Amino acid sequence: MGVSDVVCAVNGDIELYVYVSPHASRSGFECVDEWRKRLVIKVKSPPRNNEANKEVVALIEKTTKHKCEITHGWKDRHKTVLIHGTEREVIQLLKGAIKEVSKEK
C-alpha cells in the first residue's frame, strides 16, 4: 500500500485521507497505515484550539506547494484533506516527503 492508495481525485482536486498523531516529538509524514488506509502525519501541536489542524494544513501545503483544507474530521484523528492540485504531482511530492522521513530513522 502506498500514497496513491490514500488519495482520490475529486472534481479536479485531490482528497487525501490522513491519520493525525498530535503531541509528537517531531512533525512530519510517517507512512501509509495499511490497516487504517490513511497517511500518518505526526505533529508537535496539541489537539486543542485547532492547533494540530493548523499544523497539518501548513505541513501539507509546504510539502505539496498547493493550498489545502480539512473537509472532514476537524475534531477527529481521521481527517480528509482537500488539496487543490494535480494528482500525479501531489502523489510524487508526498512520496518524496515519506522517503525523507525513512532516511532520517
Image (tube, rainbow, N blue to C red):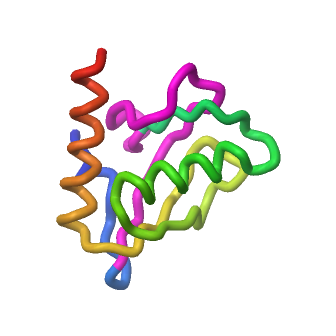
Q: Classify 78 as above or below 73.
A: above
Quadrant for the N terminus in the image: top left
- Residue in view at x 22 percent, y 45 percent: 95
Foreground: 65 or 68?
Answer: 65
Q: Tell me where residue 16 appears, x and y as whole percent.
A: 40, 58
Q: Which quadrant would residue 21 be assigned to in this image?
A: top right
Foreground: 13 or 68?
Answer: 68
Q: Residue furthest top?
A: 105
- Residue in view at x 61 percent, y 31 percent: 44
Q: Is residue 37 left or right of residue 48?
A: left
Quadrant for the C terminus in the image: top left
Task: Indicate whether residue 51 is drawn in magenta.
Answer: no
Q: Tell me where residue 43 appears, x and y as whole percent.
A: 56, 35
Q: Tell me where residue 57 appears, x and y as whole percent.
A: 54, 56
Q: Is residue 4 left or right of residue 41?
A: left
Q: Tell me where residue 33 appears, x and y as whole percent.
A: 37, 33
Instruction: Considering the whole magenta stretch, tell me its main secondary structure.
Output: strand
Task: Indicate whether residue 26 is drawn in magenta.
Answer: yes
Q: Classify 58 as above or below 70.
A: above
- Residue in view at x 44 percent, y 59 percent: 61
Q: Is residue 10 left or right of residue 73?
A: left
- Residue in view at x 47 percent, y 47 percent: 18
Q: How many marks?
A: 0
Magenta segment boundaries in residue numbering? 13-39
Q: Residue furthest bottom?
A: 11
